[in-house]
Amino acid sequence: MASLKELKGRINSVKSTQKITKAKQMVAAAKLRRAQAAAEAARPYAERLSGVMASLAGKVSGDSAPKLLRGTGSDQRHLLVVVNTDKGLCGGLNANIVKAAKVKARALIAEGKDVEFYLVGKKGRAPIKRDYADRIKKHYDTSNVRQPGFEEAEEIADDLIARFESGEFDVAHLVYPIFKSALAQDPTVDQLIPVPAPEGEGTGGDAVVEYEPGEEEILEELLPRYVKTQLFGALLEREASEQGASMTAMDNATRNAGELIQKLTIQYNRSRQAAITTELIEIIAGAEAL
Amino acid sequence: MALHFELVTPEKLVRSEDVHMVVVPGAEGDFGVLEGHAPFMSTIHDGDVQVYKTEGSAPETIEVRGGFAEVSEKGLTVLAEHVEG
């Protein structure tokens, strides 16, 4: 059995760990509210954009459609854009994202396609490198800004579109977590490029809409913007998911630490009592011997 | 007798209000939108969106960068990439 001093040391160390997890939990709870509000605020733009896209994409089709909508005509080379968090302490979130990405990669490789990775965020690097070290194209670092905003999404999208235009890949998929609640974040795989025609009613309705300059020119402007919006949405979802997962994980950690402290305290008290009893017996036995 | 005007950026919904007229810096020239404008869609260039709250009032200018404007029966929607201020 551990000595009294050792037990005391362990109790203190667990207590200070508990303080850290508790602090992290409260920080995550506060940040979660902000991240959720940001995700909420970004929704109108995305909604209106896909509405306009839907009404335009139906009108421009066939060979005249821009490359971003039409695709390169082949689907041999795939690029997986995996959005991970930059910081840990958020439970199984990153493991789940990586798992979803790997499942997708395996399925594509089994079909005989070429798969490459484009990683956003720090935490996906190590686990993906372990399996597909030679397939990683680029790491995009988001850890140098406090909260990734539209500028970052823009940068990633511009980079991706430039790579697409130069023919580095045919199809891009976006792997990111969708924030359901603080308890559930679902990793999702969406096709990013070529842009899938959004479903739903166009905002224009049946009315004849006039376009300036022309449908194709507008669509050509719209598509990169749509990709940006998708990436921006993914970054916002990631932010909310990270804070949600972190809050839950830290709540569990705090509770576990509490239980451990209780158990150790009981053990500590028992050994203290045992030591006192032994001492008493020794004294009594000594007195009787006289 | 009012035009529903919405100004949206990726970050948030900047404006959503009923106004008299809005002048938008279209790619092929500025255009004014009043209530009952025909359905119309245009890309916009960097410049000022002028919002006239009521007829004859001084316009309020909002600087926008990149994006496009859409006029439907529901009103005018400006989707801008950035809004200054």
Image (cartoon, coloured by chain):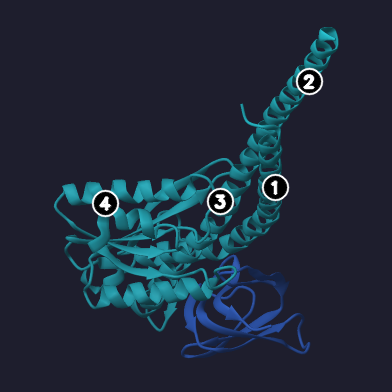
Chain colours: A cyan, B blue
Distance between the Cα atoms at labels 3 and 1? 16 Å
Labels 2 and 1 positioned on one and the same chain = yes
Q: Is mark 4 on a helix, strand or loop?
A: helix
Q: How crowded is mark 3: few (under 14 residues within 10 Å), some or many (20 or more)?
A: some
Distance between the Cα atoms at labels 4 and 3? 26 Å
The residue where tag 2 is placed is: A279
Distance between the Cα atoms at labels 1 and 4? 42 Å
Labels 4 and 3 positioned on one and the same chain = yes
| Residue type indicated by callout 4 | Ala
Q: Residues within 10 Å of mark 4 (few under 14, many from 20)?
A: many
Sequence order check, earlier mark of 2 and 3: 3
Q: Who is closer to the viewer here, B85 or A3?
A: A3
Q: Residue A105 carries which label?
A: 4
Distance between the Cα atoms at labels 2 and 1? 33 Å
Indicate the chain on which mark 4 is placed: A
Indicate the chain on which mark 3 is placed: A
In the image, which is nearer the foreground, mark 2 or mark 3?
Answer: 2
| Residue type indicated by callout 1 | Ser
The residue where tag 3 is placed is: A89
Residue B14 visible to the viewer: yes
Name the residue at the top extreme: A288
Q: Who is closer to the viewer here, A197 or A98?
A: A98
Q: Which residue is drawn at 40% across and 84% down?
A: A213
* Quadrant of the image containing the N terminus of chain A: top right
Task: Return the x and y of residue A245 as percentages of the image width and height.
Answer: 57, 47
Task: Return the x and y of residue A110 as percentages of the image width and height.
Answer: 17, 47
Q: In this view, does A246 lie above or below A47?
A: above
Q: Is mark 3 on a helix, strand or loop?
A: loop
